[in-house]
Amino acid sequence: MSNGWSACLQTLEGHSGSVWSVAFSHDSTWLASASADSTVKIWDTSSGTCMHTLEGHRGYVWSVAFSHDSTWLASASADSTIKIWDTSSGTCVHTLEGHSSLVRSVAFSHDSTWLASASDDSTVKIWDASNGRSACLQTLKSHSSLVRSVAFSQDSTRLASA
C-alpha cells in the first residue's frame, strides 16, 4: 500500500454499461467487474488485460465474488439468478435459481463451502458450493424488505446481511 492514493495506476475499459461491483481474487492477480451490460469481466491486474468476458445473464449484474482459491467466481443478477463460473476457462458451470426477484449480493464462505446470496425478495439463501454442488441449503426470511448485502465472518461461523 502506498502513502499517496492520488495516482491512478490503471483504467480498465471494456464494459458498455455502468460497472456496479468489483472484486479482487484473494491473491490479487485478477479483478472481476460486474456491469449493467449483463456481463462480467475478469481482468489480469498486472497487465490490465481482459482475460474473460462472461456472458449469460439476462439482466444487470449487481455483484461478483471469488471463491477463496479463486477457482470459482459467483455473479448475482437482476435476472434473479446466480451464476458460478470457472475462472480458468470462463465457462458457466452452474446457474442457481430460487430467488423470486433480483439478486444484489453474493459472498463465499472463507473455505468456499457455502455461497450466500441477498435478494430484493427479502431473503438470504445459503447454497452448497462444495464439490461442484449447487443446492440451496437454507432460505433465511428475517428481513422485512430487500436485502442488499451479505458477508461471512473470517471463520465462516457467522453470516451478516443488510
Image (cartoon, helix red, strand yellow):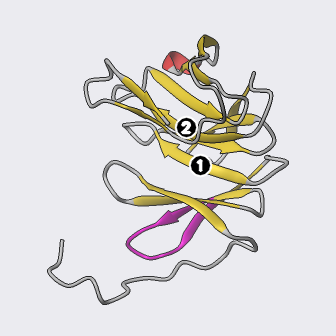
**Residue 88 visible somewhere in the drawing:** no
Residue holding disc 1: 63
Residue density around tag 2, few if under 14, some if 14–19, many if 20 or more, within 10 Å: many
Label 2 secondary element: strand
Residue type at mark 2: give it.
Val
Identify the mark nearer the N-term, 1 or 2: 1
Total labels: the figure holds 2
- Work out whether residue 131 or residue 162 is closer to the camera in this orientation and state it: 162
100 vs 20, left or right, is right
- Residue, far right: 58
Instruction: Note whether 101 is above or below 126 in the view shown.
Output: below
Magenta residues (range): 41-52
- Residue found 43% across the figure and 82% down from its top: 10
- Residue, far top: 137
- Label 1 to label 2: alpha-carbon separation: 6 Å
- Residue, far front: 144
Instruction: Note whether 108 is above or below 20 in the view shown.
Output: above
- Asked whether disc 1 touches disc 2, contact meaning CB atoms under 8 Å apart, the reply is yes
Q: Where is residue 124 in the image (x, y as percent from the top left)?
A: 59, 24
Location of residue 79 (image quadrant): top right
Q: Position of residue 23 (x, y in %)?
A: 46, 55
Q: Position of residue 48 (x, y in %)?
A: 48, 76
Location of residue 20 (image quadrant): bottom right
Q: Please tell me whether residue 74 belongs to the stretch shown in magenta.
A: no
- Residue, far left: 3
Label 1 secondary element: strand
- Residue found 63% across the figure and 66% down from its top: 19
Q: Which mark is residue 18?
A: none
14 vs 127, left or right, is right
Residue holding disc 2: 106
